Structures are given as C-alpha cells and as structure tokens.
Image (cartoon, rainbow, N blue to C red):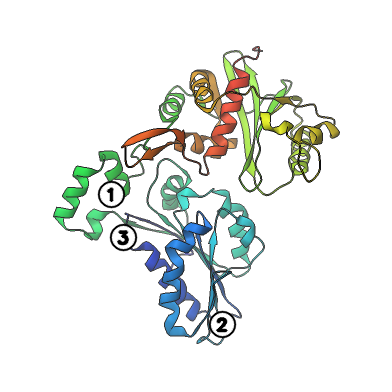
C-alpha cells in the first residue's frame, strides 16, 4: 500500500525473485494503456546476469514477447501488453525521458543517489508510479540515510529481513558462516547492519575524525574569497567538480557536483552559471594531467576548450595513486566539508575501499572502481594542490 518502499535483506534472501514477480503481478493488474515497468541494477551486465533469466522464467505463463537485445518482456496475455525492461544504472540515459508505472532499484546503495532523484522520479510522475529500493547494506551511504529517513516520511514503507528473521539457513550453516566471515562482514551481509565498517575502507578513519572534530557541517563558501575549482573528468563515467576555498587553518570544500555523458562545454557553462548565480569570484581551475591530451575527433584538448572560454586552467601535479592517497590522508586534519552541498562527496569518501583478493586473503593496493571513485579522485586532486597553496 506504499508508493515508496524500502527493503533491506540479507544475501540469498530471494529479493530479486520477489521483485521480478512483484513487477509481473503489478503489470498484469494495471488497467492503463501500455504500462511500463523497470528493473534496474547498478550495472547493465549485472542486471542481465541477476534478473533476465528470472524475468523470462516467471513471465512464461503470460504469453511473453521477448526482446533479447533490448532486454524487455511484454505480457501478451494482458490486453494492454504491459512491458518490463531490464536496465543498468551505469547508463542512466537509457531510461531518461521515459514514463514508468513502477520500478525496482536493486542494490540501490551501489548506485548514485541522483539516479533516483534526477532521472527516475520525473519518469514516475505522470503515471503516479511506485518504486522499491532494495539491497543489502554496504556501508554509510545514501541507502542507509534513506532507510532511516523513511520512518519520518509519509507514504513510505519498510521491510527488514536479516537472516535471524528469515531463518533461511540452518543453525549449522549460520555457525559455519560466522566462523569463516569477518565479524563486520557477517553483521553487514547476513544481519543487515548499516553500521558495520566498510571492509578495506580507504578514508573511513579520517572521515570519522573529521566528523568527531566538527569539520563536517554547515560551512558555506564565503563571498570575497576566491573559489578554486577542481575537476575529475569522465565521459560514460562521472565527471566531478568541487569548489574549494582556503582557510587560515586548512581548506573548505564548499560545493561538489557530478554529471555524466556530457561534453566539456556543459561543465564550462555550468561553472559560469554557478558563479553568476552565487556571486562568487573564480580563483584557479585545476584539471587532471590527462586534460592536455588532444581528442582524435576534434584535435583539441580539454585545456583548449577552457582557454577558448577565457579560462586558463592549471594541471594537478601528477602523483601515483598510492602517493596521492597518502597526500589525501595527510591533508584530512585540515579539511572542512560543507555538508549541505557536498553530501555525495562525503558519502563517497566514507565508502571508497580497496579491492579484496579472495584467493590471497589480502586487500590490494588498488581501490574498487565504483560510484565513489570519481569523488575520491576529486578529493585527491584537491588535497595534492591545496597542500602547497598559501593560506588566506
């Protein structure tokens, strides 16, 4: 009976099967013309592996028309031929501008929060569509925040399914898992604890210290002080942008944003509009060292585009990843974050973590490349360049 519903469940609880069957059931009973539903996982390849066979299997009794290339199923036994499509959140443009009667966001914590707010929500408005947000906890991210905030939101429902509630495994199986898994891993994966530490977190202790010392809070950028702009560039991946000011005792990251699948002119126009709207004075613009590479298509580099717009950017000093991470950790004691306008950055820095080698049972020196990586790279650039900058 809730339009917005959150489900937290342990591994192998059957949430994907349940969600697919729920989509099919809702589609069959929808009397509207040409109903449309979506199952969305963090990556399209992952969505296909997890849900596509389930969708075909459970749609089989309803005379399905199956499109293998576009990953949709139409239920022809219903007179209005409702359609259910599999999507990946790594290509949000694939469902931008569509209308939807309902959607399932599986492993929502591994997606960008903006997928829901900026792209999916408008697609649901004209049909009064619904959403199920579901997954297993994976650290202090937006899924965790929404889970707790749902208690105070009208029209939101919740279902909490730790293994101690589902009793899906025998006591012997649970005992064996507890013996094999780290305590934090078991608490997170099986008992659905949002508070269990992210395994191999790169900056978790630094962020905890920043929170405890009051350096994460309401610290808006000050007028009259130049705002330095830092960017981490991507195309299919995110491009991130941070606005930073020097403080007598450190640096303030006052604003951060991200976007994807946009040309460089989009970010130049965005920056100009932001400066015009806020009245801030532009300081230096810093780009990663690969911004000097020229495109084969245009023969121009990212730097050339900025110079054409009368902005002369500087390049971030090139450091190896591990040296950059060390520099970032060293800079944390003097870093402030304006929480209202850097929410995604803060969550990313808490979630950024090293890969785990299952065979050797060690954490690798390479962090996992996921939604948090681009904000973590942005903070690395800020720390490298700001550590050498003079204080106001």
Which quarter of the image is occupied by the C terminus? top right
Query: In x, y percent, where is residue 66?
Result: 53, 77
Residue 219 shows in this picture: no
Whichever of labels 2 and 1 marks the residue nearer the N terminus, that label is: 2
Direction from residue 98 to residue 312 in the image, left or right:
right
- Mark 1 or mark 3, whichever is nearer to me: 3
Label 1: which residue?
A: 191
In the depicted view, which residue is nearer to us: 224 or 251?
251
Whichever of labels 1 and 3 marks the residue nearer the N terminus, that label is: 3
Label 2: which residue?
A: 81
Which quarter of the image is occupied by the N terminus? bottom left
Q: Secondary structure at mark 1?
A: loop
Query: In x, y percent, where is residue 107?
Result: 44, 54
Number of residues whose C-alpha sits closer than 10 Å to that of mark 1, classed few (under 14), some (14–19) or many (20 or more): many
In the depicted view, which residue is nearer to us: 21 or 29?
21
Give me the C-alpha separation between circle 2 and circle 3.
Answer: 30 Å
Label 3: which residue?
A: 13
Direction from residue 91 to residue 60 in the image, left or right:
left
Whether 75 is drawn above or below 147: the answer is below
Give me the C-alpha separation between circle 1 and circle 3.
Answer: 11 Å
Query: In x, y percent, where is residue 134?
Result: 42, 57
């Amino acid at each position: 009976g809730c339009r917005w519903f959150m489900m937290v469940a342990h591994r192998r609880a059957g949430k994907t099967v349940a969600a697919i069957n729920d989509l099919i059931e809702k589609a069959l009973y929808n009397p509207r013309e040409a109903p449309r539903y979506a199952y969305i996982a963090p990556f399209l390849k992952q969505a296909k592996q997890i849900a596509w066979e389930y969708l075909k299997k459970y749609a089989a009794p309803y005379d399905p028309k199956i499109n293998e290339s576009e990953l949709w199923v139409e239920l022809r036994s219903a007179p209005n031929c409702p359609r259910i499509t599999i999507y990946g959140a790594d290509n949000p443009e694939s469902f931008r501008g569509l209308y939807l009667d309902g959607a399932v966001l599986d492993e929502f914590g591994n997606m960008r929060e903006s997928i829901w707010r900026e792209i999916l929500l408008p697609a649901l408005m004209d049909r009064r569509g619904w959403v199920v947000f579901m997954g297993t906890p994976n650290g202090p991210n937006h899924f965790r925040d929404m889970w707790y905030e749902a208690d105070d939101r009208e029209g939101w429902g919740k279902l909490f399914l730790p293994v101690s509630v589902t009793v899906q495994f025998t006591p012997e199986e649970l005992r064996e898992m507890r013996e094999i898994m780290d305590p934090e891993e078991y608490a997170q994966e099986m008992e659905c604890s949002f508070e269990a530490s992210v395994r191999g977190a790169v900056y978790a202790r630094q962020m905890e210290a920043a929170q405890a010392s009051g350096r994460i809070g309401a610290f808006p950028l000050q007028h009259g002080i130049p705002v330095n702009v830092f960017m981490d560039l991507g195309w299919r991946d995110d491009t991130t942008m941070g606005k930073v000011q020097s403080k007598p005792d450190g640096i303030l990251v006052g604003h951060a944003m991200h976007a994807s699948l946009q040309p460089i002119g989009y970010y130049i126009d965005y920056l100009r509009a932001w400066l015009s709207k806020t009245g801030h004075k532009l300081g230096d613009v810093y780009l990663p060292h690969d911004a000097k590479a020229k495109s084969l298509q245009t023969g121009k580099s990212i730097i050339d585009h900025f110079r054409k717009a009368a902005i002369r950017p500087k390049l971030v000093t090139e450091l190896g990843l591990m040296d950059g991470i060390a520099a970032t950790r060293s800079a944390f004691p003097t870093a402030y974050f304006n929480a209202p306008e850097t929410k995604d950055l803060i969550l990313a820095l808490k979630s950024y973590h090293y890969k785990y080698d299952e065979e050797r049972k060690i954490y690798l020196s390479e962090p996992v490349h996921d939604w948090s990586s681009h904000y973590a790279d942005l903070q690395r650039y800020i720390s490298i360049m700001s550590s050498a900058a003079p204080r106001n």
